[in-house]
Image (cartoon, grey):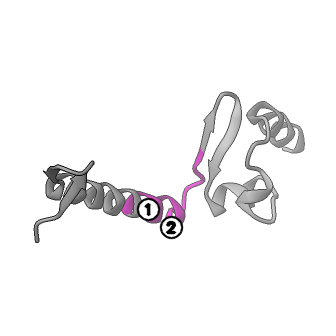
Amino acid sequence: MRIITSIGSRNIEDITERKDTEKKLRDSEQLYQRLLEQSFDAIAIHKDGKIAYLNKRAAEILGAASPEDLIDRPIFDLIYQFKKGS
């Protein structure tokens, strides 16, 4: 299926390839998300020194009720807390 859009009042652009690429990216992101969520390993991603993502296993190990409880917390606080509790 071809997707055509109007830009302004005169120009027409075929955006089929762009839409196909966007769909492939969404599908890839969903697959990656499922892999992270279903992993038996603890997975944490941090950005700028704060937790950006944790899967359920990581939250369990750190003693949180859910991953959302730890999002945006400083990663070094969690490392210190986990080491201290060991």
Nearer to us in this view, 11 or 86 = 11
Furthest-front residue in view? 9
Element on which disc 1 rests: helix
Nearer to us in this view, 35 or 47 = 47
The kind of residue tagged 2 is: Gln
**Which image quarter is the C terminus in?**
top right
Q: Are marks 2 and 1 in contact (CB under 8 Å)?
A: yes
Residue on which disc 2 sits: 38
Taking the image as shown, residue 72 lies to the left or right of residue 17, namely: right
Q: Position of residue 43 (x, y in %)?
A: 57, 50
Taking the image as shown, residue 1 lies to the left or right of residue 7, namely: left
**Which image quarter is the N terminus in?**
bottom left
- Residue 48, by quadrant, is top right
Mark 1 Cα shell of 10 Å, populated few (<14), some (14-19), many (≥20)? few
Residue on which disc 1 sits: 35
Q: Residue at x 88, y 38 (%)?
A: 84
The kind of residue tagged 1 is: Leu
Furthest-bottom residue in view? 1
What are the residue bounds of the magenta stretch?
31-44
Q: Position of residue 66 (x, y in %)?
A: 75, 64
Q: Position of residue 18 (x, y in %)?
A: 21, 52
